[in-house]
Image (tube, grey):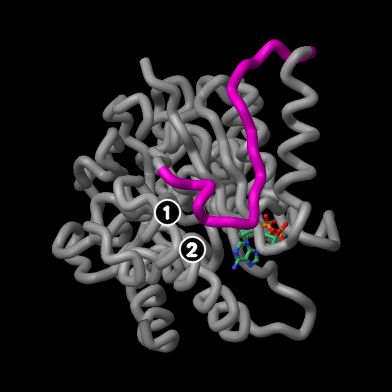
């Protein structure tokens, strides 16, 4: 089988951790790109030094030049600024929109066949923008949001119930942010729905902890935001695409009619394969869940309009 190539744009915390997991796990050869000279090269060399001791043969390279990403199967976009003190969400949106727009144009000019996986926040808006700026079919542009939010929900459920996390299956859909939609009815411990296992107020507390998951990490770290669980979530999505597995993962995908939502990117369960998003799965939602998802999508649509994408 020909070796697979994944390019990671942005060699910061999320990008570099993703690169190391991908190469170390033998998933693909990886090229990292960053605007900072020496950063991707230095991190790539450090990772290459680990190959003999960890016995992996995938390669990692770093460059500041987009020519290096030619022939990529998947391109992961993590380039962007983290939110700094005094910076509003709108300031962050404007700054990252500029970065993601330019990155999307560059990557598609060099590697037009790739599947684009967006990670930069605010995620749903940036994924929509990457799709627009790239000119790619929407099936080949998706974002990492729901997998991470679901992983955080699973962690909260495992801690609360004492169950092994292996036994927990948790699902969060909707916007990656305060308007996310955790689905306790569709989340299980050893196959049993949470709604059959826990009292409503305990479920409410778990949902709140899930929504605050990212901010909980930020407030402990003080500088920067989460990167281990985000990188793990990216790798799971990349494996589904490269392996053409047809795995159903909550992914930020383009909706035009599904769930009654139009012209927005938001996380819902999607079938992933070699071409990117192979299908959108419309799970059964009750009236409250469906309304929450539509309200969540409306927040994304507002931001898209505000960013004039
Ligand atoms: N092209 C390439 N790289 C860029 C560009 C650009 N135009 N602009 C910034 N970068 C690089 C920065 O130099 C930095 O190395 O993006 C990297 C971002 O890394 P970090 O600041 O460490 O941020 P990180 O924690 O990795 O988060 C990246 O992912 O989860 C999201 O909210 C997070 O939007 C943020 C992104």
Which residue in the structure is indicated by mark 2?
123
* Residue at left offset 79%, top offset 13%: 53
Task: Work out whether 113 lies above or below 129.
Answer: above
Q: Tags 2 and 1 in contact by the CB under 8 Å rule?
A: yes
Left or right, 224 with respect to 249, comes to: right
Residue 260: quadrant of the picture: bottom left
Q: Residues in magenta? A: 53-70
Which residue in the structure is indicated by mark 1?
143
Q: Nearer the viewer, residue 94 or 111?
A: 111
Which disc is residue 46 wearing?
none
> Would you say residue 59 sits in the magenta stretch?
yes
- Please state, as top left, top right, bottom left or bottom right, where the N terminus lies in the image: top left
Task: Work out whether 192 lies above or below 208.
Answer: above
Q: Position of residue 216 (x, y in %)?
A: 73, 56
* Residue at left offset 43%, top offset 37%: 237
**Does the numbered disc 2 mark a residue whose Cβ is under 8 Å from ligand 1?**
yes
Count residues near mark 2 (Cα–Cα under 10 Å), then give few for <14, some for 14-19, many for 20+: many
Q: Element at badge 2?
A: helix
Q: Nearer the viewer, residue 83 or 187?
A: 83
Rendered-image quarter of ligand 1? bottom right
Residue 104: quadrant of the picture: bottom left
- Please state, as top left, top right, bottom left or bottom right, where the C terminus lies in the image: bottom left
Q: Element at badge 1?
A: strand
Task: Work out whether 228 lies above or below 246.
Answer: below
* Residue at left offset 61%, top offset 46%: 32
Q: Position of residue 86 (x, y in %)?
A: 76, 85
Q: Position of residue 74 (x, y in %)?
A: 42, 42
């Amino acid at each position: 089988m020909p070796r697979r190539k994944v390019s990671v744009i942005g060699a910061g915390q999320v990008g570099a951790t993703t690169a190391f997991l991908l190469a170390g796990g033998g998933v693909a050869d990886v090229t990292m790109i960053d605007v900072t000279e020496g950063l991707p090269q230095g991190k790539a060399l450090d990772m290459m030094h680990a190959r003999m001791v960890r016995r992996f043969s995938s390669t990692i390279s770093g460059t500041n030049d987009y020519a290096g990403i030619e022939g990529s199967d998947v391109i992961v976009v993590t380039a962007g600024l983290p939110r700094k003190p005094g910076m509003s969400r709108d300031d962050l949106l404007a700054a990252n929109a500029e970065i993601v727009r330019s990155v999307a144009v560059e990557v598609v000019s060099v590697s037009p066949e790739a599947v684009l996986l967006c990670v930069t926040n605010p995620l749903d808006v940036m994924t929509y923008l990457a799709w627009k700026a790239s000119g790619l079919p929407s099936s080949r542009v998706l974002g990492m949001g729901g997998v991470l939010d679901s992983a955080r929900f699973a962690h909260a459920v495992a801690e609360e119930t004492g169950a092994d996390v292996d036994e927990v299956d948790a699902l969060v859909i909707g916007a990656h942010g305060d308007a996310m939609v955790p689905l306790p009815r569709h989340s299980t411990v050893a196959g049993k729905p949470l709604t059959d296992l826990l009292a409503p107020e305990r479920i409410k507390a778990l949902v709140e902890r899930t929504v605050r998951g990212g901010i909980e990490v930020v407030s402990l770290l003080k500088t920067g935001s989460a990167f281990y669980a985000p990188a793990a979530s990216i790798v799971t999505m990349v494996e589904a695409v490269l392996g053409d597995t047809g795995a159903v993962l909550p992914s930020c995908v383009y909706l035009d009619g599904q769930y009654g939502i139009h012209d927005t990117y938001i996380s819902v369960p999607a079938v992933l394969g070699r071409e990117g998003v192979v299908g959108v799965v419309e799970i059964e939602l009750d009236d409250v869940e469906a309304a929450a998802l539509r309200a969540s999508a409306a927040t994304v649509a507002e931001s898209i309009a505000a960013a004039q994408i």
